[in-house]
Amino acid sequence: MSDHHVVVVGGGFGGLQLLNGLKGAGVKITLVDRRNHHLFQPLLYQVATTILSTSEIAWPIRRLYADRPDVTVLLGEVTGVDSGAKTVSLRNGMTLGYDTLVLATGATHAYFGHDEWEPVAPGLKTLEDATTIRRRVLLAFEKAEMEADPAVRDALLTFTIVGAGPTGVELAGIIAELAHFTLPKEFRNIDTRKTRVVLVEAGPRVLPTFAEELSAYAQKALEKLGVEIHLGKPVTECNADGVKIGETFVASRTIVWAAGVTASPAARWLDVAADRAGRVVVEKDLSAPGLPDVFVVGDTASVMREDGKPVPGIAPAAKQQGGYVAKVIRARISGKPAPAPFRYWHQGSLATIGKSAAIIDFGRIKLKGWIAWWIWGLAHIYFLIGTRSRFSVAWSWLWIYLSGQHSARLITQRETMREEE
């Protein structure tokens, strides 16, 4: 093994794909992450909506690389990078030297200048977010069951999702199904079928990155489930009592934010150019401007396609970027010519609407309905890590499909923001 030290910050799709691509390269690798697990984010909303448990979509990073002596895993938070000294600083005071640095630090929620909304409208990026949202959703029904005031009860049974991208649409569809089909027989004082699920989108249509025909299908499918859709008006106020959509106030005790993201502080660490979302504007080989030994991948990077459109912030894009940077590092170490500039291959866009409908946009080929749902499910199961996870998720989906019962309706994780009032 050579003395070349690769430091990777972030154990998401991009970071792990890079590690996999460097297997056998003869370099020392240190992976730093704030959490001890790799998270399959595309299914995170299913934890938030009681379909899957946390262990079905997350795996300990150390276990994944237990048989890779070239990989050292550190649980820590990076606070800065000194590109001149080629060091990375951690919050605990530790300093790591690197020969090559890869930043795959992802993104977090963006509240467009209203960060004060976060406590009452959590986003969905981590397991903690998912269990918090799950707890709030389930507690809303429990509180409504004991509430004598009709106005308060109605507010408890109103769930608002801000943002109608894939996450917002998927959340709205499953919460509506949960309320209208799964829970009605379990409560005595409330009729959960009267639950309101409100989906708010500032733009003109849901799923704006999909073809218009698929967007229209998704909207009709949501409306068939009873979801109220508000288009063309942004949320102008958000508090513990509800949201203001334009000038209209909607009393709602459970709010989920799915309207936007902002990148990690990587651009500030490196003191390089960033786009409006804070992503590092990288070179064609995904290196940071003026820093050939520093690479940025995934949601932290702003990468343009040949047609001038940005590479989407989705898991397949991060994996492609991580794999590409591994090839660049291998070429440099072995003295071989560098690979051609990074080119993104779009494998399609997918979104589900409830338990038996989905849309898939492969470009020329567009699918919708139950066929798309089955393809969506098979694709996600294929990319899960480990046979046990694939079997467990497949069984959970089959059980829900046949019985209509969600298996992960547990209220856990003490949370004192609003539930304990």
Image (cartoon, helix red, strand yellow):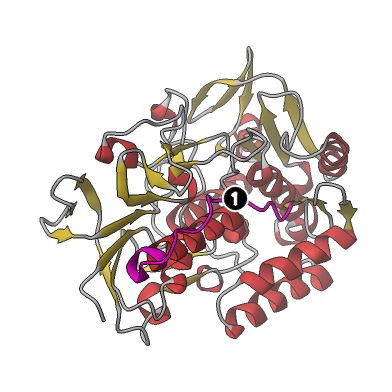
Image quadrant occupied by the C terminus: top left
Under mark 1, the amino acid is: Arg
Work out whether residue 333 or residue 269 is closer to the camera in this orientation and state it: 333
Identity of the residue furthest to the top in this view? 247
Above-or-below relation of 106 to 375: above
Residue found 68% across the figure and 72% down from its top: 381
Q: Report helix, strand or loop for mark 1.
A: loop
Residue 327, horizontal then vertical, whole percent = 46, 65
Q: Is 283 positioned to the left or the right of 347 in the image?
A: left
Which residues lie in the magenta part? 331-348
Which residue is tagged 1? 343
In the depicted view, which residue is nearer to us: 254 or 85? 85
Looking at the rendering, which quadrant does residue 138 occupy?
A: bottom right
**Relative side of 58 to 204, left or right:** left
Q: Residue at x 32, y 78 (%)?
A: 26
Q: Up-down: is 330 above or below 104? A: below
Quick one: 114 or 349, which is closer to the camera?
A: 349
The crowd level at tag 1 (other Cα within 10 Å; few <14, some 14-19, many 20+) is some
The secondary structure that dominates the magenta segment is loop
Q: Looking at the picture, how far across and down is residue 355, in whole percent?
A: 79, 59
